[in-house]
Amino acid sequence: MAVDQNFLKMDFDFYHLKKIKTSWIKHFLYASYFNILALLIFLTGLIHSILPMVFAFTPYKLAKKIVNETEKQFITNSKKRD
């Protein structure tokens, strides 16, 4: 099986906060919030894998929430850049 070499490269952008026009604390709070949601996705998904009748759609709904909110942030930040 071939491994995508680009996937293995480190993802550094020292101007990330400047590019998205946000502060460190705001970025920290958003990233922490999304990480907590990701942890909930893992936990509810694990429980659902053992007991399929529990949390039937919760991991999907939480993942969708992350996607929707990050896309909303991308739109807000792109308007700031214009």
Image (cartoon, grey):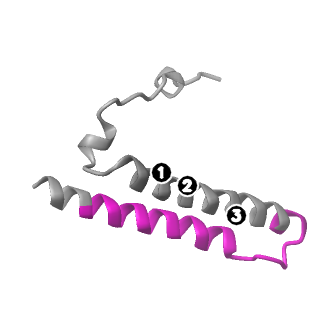
Q: Is residue 67 magenta?
A: yes
The Cα atoms of the two marked residues, 1 and 3, are separated by 18 Å
Q: Specify the amino acid type for callout 3.
A: Leu
Q: Residues in magenta?
A: 48-76
On the image, numbered disc 1 is attached to which residue?
28
Q: Along the line of sight, which residue is nearer the eye, 78 or 9?
A: 78
Distance in Å between CA atoms under marks 1 and 2: 6 Å
Q: Residue at x 29, y 34 (%)?
A: 15
Whether residues under marks 2 and 3 lie with C-beta atoms below 8 angstroms apart, the answer is: no
Q: For the stretch drawn in magenta, what is the main secondary structure?
A: helix
Instruction: Work out how far the residue at label 2 is from the one at label 3, CA to CA, in angstroms.
Output: 12 Å
- The quadrant of the rendering that contains the C terminus is bottom left
Instruction: Write down the residue under mark 2.
Output: 32
Q: For the point 68% across and 62% down, which residue is it?
A: 41
User: What secondary structure is found at the residue carrying circle 1?
Assistant: helix
Which residue is labeled 3 in the image?
A: 40
Label 2 is placed on what type of residue? Ser
Disc 1 vs disc 2: Cβ atoms closer than 8 Å? yes
Circle 3 Cα neighbour tier, 10 Å, few/some/many (<14 / 14–19 / ≥20): some
